[in-house]
């Protein structure tokens, strides 16, 4: 199938060159999938999705432009190619703007497709989603409902070609399911999210997803505000992943080169506790952003970002690498054919430490276990300071105590990295902050603002 | 782009196919979207991107279940394929749709200069001017990022009950982000201007947008740590409206209410705020960012009083949720694109002007916090708990805003904070934003004058 797509991207490149581009790259995406939403023991909606589109980057003497469209006929491709060339002409010249140079044949990568997905028809997927909801309700009588239980999957084909000799394609499948449970008691309502993800639905455990949603909502019932203080904090995996994603976006070379990152000009310096090891892994099939190549067709790889407490490298695409006189780390991310590639992490991995959860809590002594943060996605400014809403539990005498909500944690990203004291060993893939695998983290101190 | 998006005969055939295996209601939504975005960073025009998409979403409603499929392309074979996919799981008879009539075009907004008719080079020039004006505000301004965006979105929606309506929507937006640096400290300032309007909205505004972003960044360079604790909070006009959008607006969307996931469930007619507070959702405000002729189900946009003199008056409905409650849609069935199902969404949501003098509202506060601009916010409608990042805020001491504060967050509960509003200013301003919900992003307007909240938690680093 991907032969067809490479033929399409190759044709799109030829047409763009004929339309006036000096160099051109075409990225094509075809995907199909299903989504099931369930509420109150009934199916709420069943969606069949189908998408196809092409995005073309054109370069004309150091000027770059981008155009995309859904019309894949030769006429449609001509319109896209001309629009990309026209876009390049109104850009300003940038000496580093040029098509990526092929970096050898990318190594094939197995395990991106679950062949079992096709054996799942709509009825089975609906049954799985209903089972997630039922599991949440059955787990605890205080779960009065599930706001939404969702299952979604997709199969996608990606191809990218360029006039500089790039030609790569791959196919992948993925799926996820989640549920928001609503738990109530006399004092009020709390919500909790449970989730699971994988290459195919056989990897999903509806019981576990439902039970997690139930546990997260019920455990917060009766939550109070902690007093404002500075104290040790333990991040669970979901929270650690959100922060890892924010930090990785600041480790993008574009942010660093353009003075938008608190980590700018810190390459090789000590920026983190030696306990914290962070890498980008674009090749682990368990990470849903894995692929043989990145969004501009250069090989994905494994890149150490923070090791031995030092900043080892920024994440590079071909543009930032050319500008820095280095090699791309295969970090040209692509949300869809509708946007040109830009620097982003593939799968982030926080290396497991040695402590289990109990040991981490015991080491915290008196502090707060943070299980949810909101507001981090709205962006951390150049200064690296952040303040986010949070909920979780008090840690008292080294064990989890009463629930806490409606407080904020505040700090500064760079000093937060040096405050990581211990790293847990129970890691998990989390779809927040991108695609992240992380264990729990113990931070020496953060500012908590509550009552 | 002026040819008919959806011929009535084709719509009828698609709806017949969609209902061939049963279902009570079917709808075809067609869309053509053309966009242009231009970026500027490091004083260079870059990231120039244009796109055109055409596609359709087909849905069939059978009982409580919605079957939906979407497809790229608007040819007959595309629509029939989507109708087939949407109905494939149904097997209970056949329903005849009402033949689709000729389309009724929704009233459009006044567009003096269609953006597509303006030379793209002058749009790039707009950003160069923005950059220059921002940098001229002070030598500490070290970086400026500018963005220009335009979009024309034509939609046509036809359903099995005889609705067939079209809308033609043009939006432009100009944004600036400035970074100021001094002694190793870096601060960011933002400003955006946008509307359901032509190029005339932004043509003369590049300087002002750039300058305001730069001034915010420069002001924040002098900022100290934000206070932590509970205190009176005065929220500024304009962008402050995002607070009402988050802490109250989302809880009024009927899907949350019907799932028992809104704190406003069962409270219509009850007093939820002081009588000084009246608030609307109004999709007809001329040329505003969240304004449209019809919603994405073909219902005309309207002005809905959601709170009148402190009393909760109405939820925000799309067709399906309105049917369930036995009321009419309030024209809030919106979708990001043909790839999404419509759900209840806000349009332009605002607190109506009150009679308080904004300066007096601040001077009555002994010690408090003045939040002028927000970096973003979020709410959990089921509990009403919300959190906001403050990008420009000041400490209020002895009735005067004194030093700027950085890293502040406002956190609280929507029901409590709404009740705690004790003054609404006579000033008024609307601002533009994108609202995310259920994986869909739509343009919304938010607005208000100055609003004072008796007591709210400010999360900062200064204990």
Image (spheres, rainbow, N blue to C red):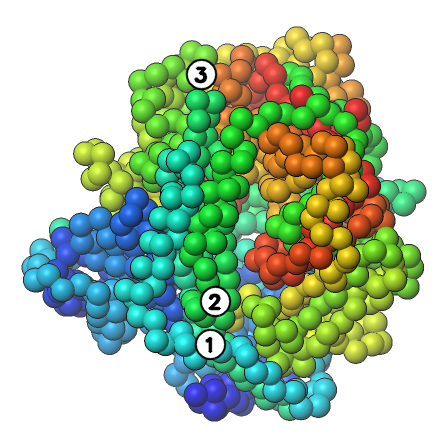
Q: Is residue B276 above or below residue B340?
A: above
Are discs 3 and 1 located on one and the same chain? no
Find residue A100 and report its image quarter: bottom right
Q: Are marks 3 and 2 on the same chain?
A: no
The residue indicated by pointer 1 is A114
Q: CA distance from mark 2 to mark 1?
A: 10 Å
Marks 3,2: beta carbons within 8 A: no
- Residue that badge 3 annotates: B273
- C-beta proximity under 8 Å, tags 2 and 1: yes
Comparing labels 3 and 1, the label whose residue is closer to the camera: 1
**Disc 3 is attached to a residue of which chain?**
B
- The percent position of residue B321, horizontal first and vertical second, equals 27, 40
Neighbour tally class for label 2: few under 14, some 14-19, many 20 plus, Cα within 10 Å: few
Marks 3 and 2, Cα distance to the nearest angstrom? Answer: 48 Å
Question: On the rendered image, what quadrant is the C terminus of chain A found in?
Answer: top right
Viewer can see residue B397: yes
* Residue drawn at 70 percent across, 17 percent down: B368
Q: Which residue is mark 2?
A: A203
Q: Nearer the viewer, residue B63 or A323?
A: B63
> Of the residues tagged 2 and 1, which is closer to the observer?
2
A378 up-or-down from A175: above or below: above
Q: In this picture, is B16 found above or below B438?
A: below
Output the chain of dot 2.
A
């Amino acid at each position: 199938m991907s032969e067809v797509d490479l033929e399409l991207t190759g044709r799109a490149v030829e047409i763009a060159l004929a339309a006036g581009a000096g160099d051109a790259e075409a990225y094509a995406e075809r995907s199909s999938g299903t989504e099931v939403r369930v509420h109150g023991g009934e199916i709420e909606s069943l969606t069949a999705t189908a998408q196809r589109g092409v995005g073309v980057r054109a370069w004309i003497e150091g000027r770059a432009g981008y155009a995309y469209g859904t019309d894949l006929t030769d006429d449609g491709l001509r319109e896209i190619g001309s629009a990309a060339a026209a876009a390049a002409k109104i850009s300003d010249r940038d000496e580093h703007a040029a098509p990526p140079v092929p970096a050898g044949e990318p190594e094939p990568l197995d395990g991106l497709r679950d062949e079992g997905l096709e054996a799942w028809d709509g009825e089975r997927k609906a049954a799985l989603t209903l089972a997630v909801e039922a599991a949440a309700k059955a787990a605890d009588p205080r779960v009065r409902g599930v706001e939404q239980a969702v299952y979604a999957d997709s199969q996608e084909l990606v191809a990218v070609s360029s006039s500089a000799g790039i030609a790569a394609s791959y196919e992948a499948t993925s799926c996820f399911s989640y549920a928001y449970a609503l738990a109530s008691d006399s004092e009020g309502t709390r919500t909790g999210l449970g989730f699971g993800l994988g290459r195919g639905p056989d990897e999903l455990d509806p019981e576990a997803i439902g039970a997690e949603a139930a546990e997260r909502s019920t455990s917060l019932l009766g939550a109070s505000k902690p007093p404002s203080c500075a104290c040790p904090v333990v991040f669970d995996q979901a929270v650690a992943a959100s922060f890892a994603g924010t930090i990785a976006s600041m480790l993008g070379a574009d942010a660093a080169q353009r003075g938008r990152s608190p980590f700018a000009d810190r390459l090789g310096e000590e920026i983190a506790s030696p306990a914290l090891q962070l890498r980008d892994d674009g090749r682990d099939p368990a990470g849903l952003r894995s692929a043989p190549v990145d969004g501009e067709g250069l090989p994905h790889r494994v890149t150490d970002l923070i090791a031995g407490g030092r900043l080892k490298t920024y994440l590079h695409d071909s543009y930032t690498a050319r500008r820095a006189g280095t090699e791309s780390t295969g970090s040209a991310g692509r949300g869809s054919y509708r946007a040109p590639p830009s620097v982003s992490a593939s799968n982030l991995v926080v290396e497991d430490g040695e402590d289990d959860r109990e040991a981490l809590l015991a080491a915290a002594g008196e502090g707060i276990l943070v299980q949810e943060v909101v507001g981090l996605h709205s962006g951390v400014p150049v200064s690296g300071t952040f303040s986010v809403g949070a909920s979780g539990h008090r840690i008292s005498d080294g064990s989890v105590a009463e629930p806490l909500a409606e407080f904020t944690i505040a700090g500064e990203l760079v000093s937060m990295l040096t405050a990581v004291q211990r790293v847990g060993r129970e890691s998990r893939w989390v779809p927040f902050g991108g695609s992240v695998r992380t264990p729990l983290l113990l931070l020496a101190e953060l500012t908590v603002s509550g009552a | 782009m002026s040819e008919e998006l959806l011929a009535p005969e084709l719509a009828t055939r698609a709806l017949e196919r969609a209902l061939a295996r049963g279902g009570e209601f079917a709808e075809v939504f067609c869309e053509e979207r053309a966009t242009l975005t231009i970026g500027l960073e490091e004083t260079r025009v870059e990231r120039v991107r244009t796109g055109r998409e055409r596609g359709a979403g087909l849905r069939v409603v059978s009982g409580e279940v919605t079957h939906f499929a979407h497809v790229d392309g608007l040819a007959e074979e595309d629509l029939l394929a989507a109708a087939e996919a949407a109905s494939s799981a149904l097997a209970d008879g056949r329903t005849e749709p009402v033949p689709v009539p000729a389309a009724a075009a929704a009233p459009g907004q006044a567009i003096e200069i269609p953006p597509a008719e303006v030379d793209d080079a002058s749009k790039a020039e707009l950003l160069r001017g923005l950059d220059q004006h921002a940098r001229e505000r002070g030598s500490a301004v070290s970086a400026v990022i500018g963005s220009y965006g335009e979009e024309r979105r034509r939609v046509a929606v036809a359903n099995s009950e005889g609705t067939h309506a079209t809308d033609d929507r043009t939006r432009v937006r100009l944004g600036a982000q400035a970074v100021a640096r001094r002694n190793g400290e870096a601060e960011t300032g933002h400003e955006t201007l946008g509307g359901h309007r032509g190029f005339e909205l932004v043509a003369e505004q590049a300087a002002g947008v750039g300058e305001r972003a730069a001034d915010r960044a420069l002001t924040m360079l002098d900022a100290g740590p934000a206070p932590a604790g509970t205190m009176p909070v005065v929220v500024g006009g304009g962008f402050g409206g995002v607070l009402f959008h988050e802490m109250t607006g989302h809880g009024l969307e009927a899907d949350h209410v019907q799932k028992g996931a809104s704190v406003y469930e069962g409270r219509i007619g009850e007093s939820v705020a002081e009588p000084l507070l009246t608030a609307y959702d109004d999709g007809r405000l001329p040329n505003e960012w969240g304004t449209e002729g019809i919603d994405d189900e073909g219902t005309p946009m309207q002005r809905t009083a959601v709170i009148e003199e402190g009393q909760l008056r109405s939820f925000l409905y799309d067709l399906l949720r309105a049917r369930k409650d036995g009321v009419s849609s309030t024209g809030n069935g919106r979708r990001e694109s043909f790839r999404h199902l419509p759900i209840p969404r806000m349009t332009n949501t605002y607190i109506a002007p009150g009679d308080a003098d904004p300066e007096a509202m601040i001077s009555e506060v002994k010690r408090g916090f003045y939040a002028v601009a927000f970096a973003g916010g979020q709410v959990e409608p089921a509990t009403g708990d919300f959190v906001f990042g403050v990008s420009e805020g000041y400490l209020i001491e002895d009735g005067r805003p004194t030093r700027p504060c950085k890293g502040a967050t406002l956190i609280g509960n929507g029901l409590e904070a709404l009740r705690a509003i004790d003054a609404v200013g006579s000033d008024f301003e609307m601002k533009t934003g994108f609202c995310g919900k259920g994986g869909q992003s739509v343009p919304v307007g938010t607005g208000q004058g100055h609003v004072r909240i008796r007591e709210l938690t400010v999360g900062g680093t200064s204990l």
